[in-house]
Image: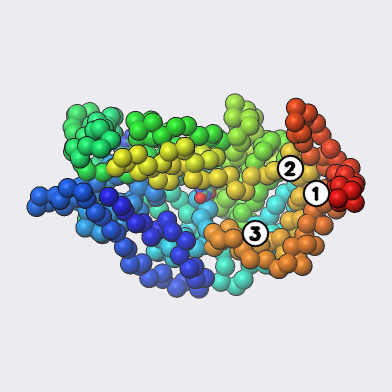
Amino acid sequence: MRVFRPYLTALPLKTIKQHQQPKPKILTITATSSSPLSGRKLRAAVIGGGPAGSSAAEALAAGGVETFLFERSPSTAKPCGGAIPLCMIDEFSIPLHLIDRHVTRMKIISPSNLTVDFGSKTLKSHEFIPMLRREVLDSFLRSRAQSNGAQLITGLVTDIEVPDFLSSKPYVIHHTINNCKRSLAVDLIVGADGANSRVAKIINAGNYRCAIAFQERIKLPDEKMACYHNLAEMYVGNDVSPDFYAWVFPKCDHVAVGTGTACARRDIKVCQRGIRERVKEKIKGGRVIKVEAHPIPEQPRPRRVRGRVALVGDAAGFLDLLQRVFYGSNVGREALVLELCGDEYVQRMTFDSYLYKKMASGDRWDDVKLVLNTFGSFMRCKVTFLFFHGEEEGRVDVASLFQHLALEIRSN
Ligand SMILES: Cc1cc2nc3c(=O)[nH]c(=O)nc-3n(C[C@H](O)[C@H](O)[C@H](O)COP(=O)(O)OP(=O)(O)OC[C@H]3O[C@@H](n4cnc5c(N)ncnc54)[C@H](O)[C@@H]3O)c2cc1C
């Protein structure tokens, strides 16, 4: 059986005019079966009612598949900063009223607290970073899946009986509803149960590396909240994360203050204290209304499809820490923020790739200038790179790297 999910494909993306309601997309689902089904529809279970599961359930149900969407806890929300790329509004037909904030100002703050405005000059008049609350988005997507015919089962999936690989026998989903044990036989399963996916374990999909993200939602006094009306902040530095960044994202009536790390997972609370310290004046008088933490996959799982089970979303692990801050020292980050983030071309390329989720097609000469500027700022800041050569491991500064490259070119 094959299910084509247009949501996951790279559609030609249009830019969205503010306040223009996106039109729903036409879904195409193709399902084939080796042994014909006798007088009934194909039956699918989608495990997990987050964005991945709800959109999969919606697509399956709209395509004529009898679909059961399992969600253990529809009233709680997955921890999430809530920033989504602009193109998702169109691609997922998300109504604009679900969006809490239209962020048009980004600030990147260096380890020594120097600030670069990112976006105020480069964002086009109709562009913004949509910020929303996951509790709002997730419940909207689940309801839409239901209105397309998916049946929501509020229950915890505890186990799955998996038939032999080549057999056409059903999968049996064992689950509990209000502590009562139930089971349901289905033809296929979509595992959308997040980073700690039980479905992935059951089908032996293999493990992936995870980062961890921690976040506090803080209700600010009105005058402090007003500063974050359309502003999001990103902080870099060893104090807030050794390999990622920390953020302050505005929501409807509060801010989300959080951080993430892959290499210092045990120290995540230390990093969180770091970002709270950095923003302490800005959040003074604020009240923490929620504390949340969750793993974030860093890579895909080794197997994402097994038999008639497919993993999607965080369960599959496609999310990559794209925005990861690569330069491993505060010196490098200082250079990154001051010299590169301030560059209009860097900003435009960043927004083009983030907002529209596509490889931004840059200008050849601007690219060359960018490479030279990057090396230039590394040299000025004496940034070093870790190198591996055979058994050897060590550090090299950028000036020596250039000399070495020049020698190599001459000797060839
Ligand atoms: C602190 C933090 C901040 C983040 N910020 C951002 C951001 O700003 N922008 C962004 O794009 N991404 C962000 N992410 C990542 C984003 O949250 C995830 O990529 C996204 O939630 C994945 O969606 P999903 O549908 O695959 O899984 P999830 O959202 O994890 O949904 C899985 C669902 O499955 C349900 N479930 C799990 N097990 C079972 C079971 N056995 N039975 C029944 N139901 C089950 C869960 O209750 C849950 O509702 C952030 C993550 C964290 C942790």
Residue 18 is tagged as: none
Q: Amino acid at mark 3?
A: Thr
**In-image side of 109 versus 68 (left or right):** right
Residue 335 is tagged as: 1
Classify mark 1: residues with Cα within 10 Å, few (<14), some (14-19) or many (20+). Answer: many
Q: Which residue is mark 3?
A: 350
Is residue 263 something that shows in the picture? yes
Q: Are circles 2 and 1 on residues that touch, CB within 8 Å?
A: yes
Q: Secondary structure at mark 3?
A: helix
Picture coordinates of residue 99, whole percent (x, y): 46, 59
Q: CA distance from mark 2 to mark 1?
A: 9 Å
Q: Amino acid at mark 2?
A: Tyr
The residue that appears at 26% across and 44% down in the rendered structure is 188
Q: Is mark 3 within 8 Å of ligand 1?
A: no
Work out whether mark 2 precedes mark 1 in sequence or the reverse, and give the earlier one.
2
Work out whether mark 2 precedes mark 3 in sequence or the reverse, and give the earlier one.
2
Judge by depth and name the residue closer to the eye, 339 or 382.
382
The residue mark sitting in front, 2 or 1, is 2
Q: CA distance from mark 2 to mark 3?
A: 17 Å
Picture coordinates of residue 160, whole percent (x, y): 27, 32
The residue that appears at 45% across and 73% down in the rendered structure is 20
- Which image quarter has ligand 1? top left
Is residue 252 something that shows in the picture? no
Q: Secondary structure at mark 1?
A: helix
Q: Is mark 1 within 8 Å of ligand 1?
A: no
Classify mark 3: residues with Cα within 10 Å, few (<14), some (14-19) or many (20+). Answer: some
Classify mark 2: residues with Cα within 10 Å, few (<14), some (14-19) or many (20+). Answer: some
